[in-house]
Image (spheres, rainbow, N blue to C red):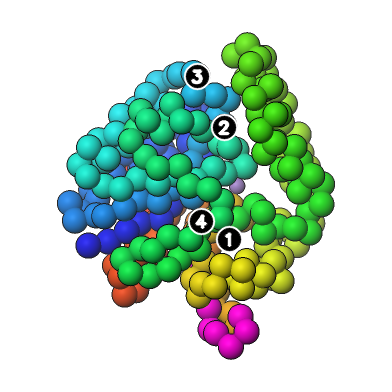
């Protein structure tokens, strides 16, 4: 029996290779799979549950097939798909997770996050994050016509790409002291997050405990999934070209 963790697929129509790899990976999941945790930025953009296209339909059908098989599906917002809502959750049969969330997974307490809230050195982004996570801002955005929402999303994405290309790399990674703080606050020895696209297993000291921070990989070039079997964590990394 295993649980899997993925994030940062950034699914979009322009990258059919990522969709293809994800669909195949889902179909190949062992029947004994207990849970699938999707820790944010699953979609490159999400402008509301009322927006439909072929990609969204295909992905929703696949996720529904997993939950129908009895796999526990849990989805957390990322900084791109933070508008995934209850309608989406009901359609695919998943739980929406708060960021952060502590879950007991196969007997182990694990802290789950998307990861953007750990990048506290990027003050400009933290301010932007506060704005877009504000329920009033979100409610207001969702009342706008679909065309307008798509146009705004397009602008935000272009602005973010421009900013990130100018940004110094230290701003794009987590703040170490913030990691220690969240692990103290939640009294866990394992943290799993994505967002930074810097996949790695980190070992760190929190008070007198040796802790582990797993950073999930993005799917830009490789399929990237972390498996936990109740004892050990195993990353699965497969080049997208193989699909
Ligand atoms: Mn992200």
Front of the two marks 3 and 1: 3
Q: Which mark is residue 101?
A: 4
Question: Outermost residue toward the left?
Answer: 31
Disc tally is: 4
Q: Is residue 26 magenta?
A: no
Real-space CA distance between mark 2 and mark 1, rounded to the nearest whole angstrom = 24 Å
- Look at mark 2 in the image and give the residue it sits on: 83
The image quarter containing residue 79 is top right
In primary-sequence order, the first of circles 3 and 1 is 3
Q: Secondary structure at mark 2?
A: loop
- Look at mark 1 in the image and give the residue it sits on: 198
Real-space CA distance between mark 3 and mark 2, rounded to the nearest whole angstrom = 11 Å
Real-space CA distance between mark 3 and mark 1, rounded to the nearest whole angstrom = 31 Å
Q: Which residues are magenta?
A: 206-214
Residue 151: image location, x then y, percent? 67, 19
Real-space CA distance between mark 4 and mark 3, rounded to the nearest whole angstrom = 28 Å
The residue drawn where x is 35% and y is 56% is 4
In primary-sequence order, the first of circles 4 and 3 is 3
Mark 2 is surrounded, within 10 Å at the Cα level, by few (under 14), some (14 to 19) or many (20 or more) other residues, namely: many
Residue 27: image location, x then y, percent? 24, 43
Q: Secondary structure at mark 3?
A: loop
Mark 4 is surrounded, within 10 Å at the Cα level, by few (under 14), some (14 to 19) or many (20 or more) other residues, namely: some
Front of the two marks 1 and 4: 4
Mark 3 is surrounded, within 10 Å at the Cα level, by few (under 14), some (14 to 19) or many (20 or more) other residues, namely: few
Q: Quadrant of the N terminus?
A: bottom left
């Amino acid at each position: 029996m295993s649980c899997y963790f993925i994030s940062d697929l950034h699914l979009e129509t322009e990258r059919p290779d990522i969709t293809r790899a994800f669909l195949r990976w889902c179909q190949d999941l062992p029947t004994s799979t207990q849970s699938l945790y999707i820790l944010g930025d699953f979609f490159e953009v999400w402008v509301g549950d009322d927006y439909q296209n072929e990609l969204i339909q295909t992905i929703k059908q696949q996720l529904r097939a997993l939950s129908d098989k009895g796999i526990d599906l849990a989805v957390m917002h990322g900084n791109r798909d933070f508008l995934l809502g209850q309608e989406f959750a009901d359609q695919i049969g998943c739980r929406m997770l708060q960021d952060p969330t502590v879950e007991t997974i196969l007997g182990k307490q694990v802290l789950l996050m998307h990861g953007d809230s750990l990048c506290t050195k990027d003050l400009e982004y933290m301010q932007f994050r506060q704005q877009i996570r504000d329920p009033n801002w979100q409610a207001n955005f969702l009342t706008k016509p679909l065309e307008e929402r798509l146009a705004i999303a397009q602008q935000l994405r272009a602005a973010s790409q421009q900013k990130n290309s100018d940004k110094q790399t230290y701003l794009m990674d987590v703040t170490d002291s913030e990691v220690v703080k969240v692990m103290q606050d939640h009294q866990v020895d394992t943290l799993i997050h994505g967002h930074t696209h810097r996949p790695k297993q980190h070992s760190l000291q929190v008070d007198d405990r040796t802790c582990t921070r797993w950073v999930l990989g993005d799917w830009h070039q490789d399929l990237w999934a972390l498996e936990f079997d109740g004892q050990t964590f195993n990353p699965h990394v497969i080049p997208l070209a193989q699909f």
